């Protein structure tokens, strides 16, 4: 094994696997994760216009909390910025959404992290996402990219 190379358990998610997913596959994985975490999926990934939210999930127990999830499948070197945080933060004020979460295959700029905290938007970058996918045993999808599927 090369220095710095991490060994990956069979069936475990890693960053390369995330980056191979198309945008639609990434949304399917995120929906599967929230379902594995015990949420009801009210609206899963759809192709085409999604009214600004990719996945709508709700807790099964009372009080019912509705979560709007935006999945950003970004390639290497592209981070989610302040503009996206502001855009999706507004969803909880005009929709029936209690919590807005942005999940990405990448990361967030420092200013986006600060903005998310101020606006009450939950953010999940690729490191935390990998932890969650592996913790909740979400099945791996062997996506094959043909062309650039990143949003």
Image (cartoon, helix red, strand yellow):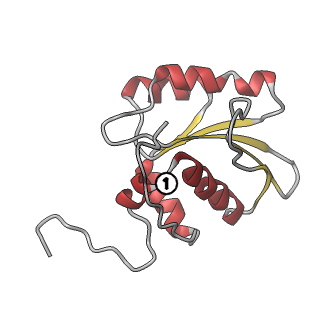
Residue 118 visible, this angle = no
Identify whether 86 is placed above or below 76: above
Residue with the mark numbered 1: 129
Of residues 122 and 57, the one drawn nearer to the viewer in this rendering: 57
Left or right: 92 in relation to 3: right
Crowding near pointer 1: few (<14 within 10 Å), some, many (20+)? many
Left or right: 51 in relation to 8: right
Residue at 60% over, 50% down: 27
Of residues 55 and 113, the one drawn nearer to the viewer in this rendering: 55
Tell me the element at label 1.
Answer: helix
Query: Residue 106, position in %: x, y?
Result: 40, 43
Identify whether 134 is placed above or below 56: below
Left or right: 100 in relation to 111: right
Query: Residue 32, position in %: x, y?
Result: 65, 61
Query: Residue 72, position in %: x, y?
Result: 52, 39
Query: In which image quadrant can residue 52 be found?
Result: top right
Query: In which image quadrant can residue 35 be found?
Result: bottom right
Identify whether 139 is placed above or below 28: below
Number of numbered labels in the structure image: 1
Identify whether 93 is placed above or below 98: above
Query: In which quadrant is the N terminus drawn?
Result: bottom left
Residue at 60% over, 32% down: 121
* Most distant residue in the front direction: 146
Residue at 47% over, 67% down: 142
Residue 94 visible, this angle = yes
* Most distant residue in the bottom direction: 10
Left or right: 58 in relation to 151: right
Of residues 50 and 57, the one drawn nearer to the viewer in this rendering: 50
Query: Residue 110, position in %: x, y?
Result: 37, 28
Residue at 53% over, 63% down: 133
* Most distant residue in the left direction: 3
């Amino acid at each position: 094994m090369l220095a710095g190379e991490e060994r990956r358990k069979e069936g475990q998610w890693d960053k390369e696997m995330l980056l191979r997913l198309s945008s639609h596959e990434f949304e399917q994985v995120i929906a599967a994760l929230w379902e594995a975490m015990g949420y009801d999926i009210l609206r899963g990934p759809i192709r085409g216009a999604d009214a600004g939210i990719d996945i709508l999930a709700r807790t099964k127990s009372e009080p019912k909390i509705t979560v709007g999830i935006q999945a950003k499948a970004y390639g290497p070197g592209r981070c989610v910025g302040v503009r996206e945080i502001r855009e999706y933060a507004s969803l909880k004020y005009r929709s029936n959404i209690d919590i807005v979460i942005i999940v990405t295959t990448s990361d967030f700029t420092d200013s986006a992290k600060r903005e998310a905290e101020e606006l009450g938007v939950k953010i999940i970058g690729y490191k935390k996402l990998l932890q969650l996918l592996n913790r909740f045993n979400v099945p791996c999808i062997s996506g094959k990219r043909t062309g650039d599927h990143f949003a």
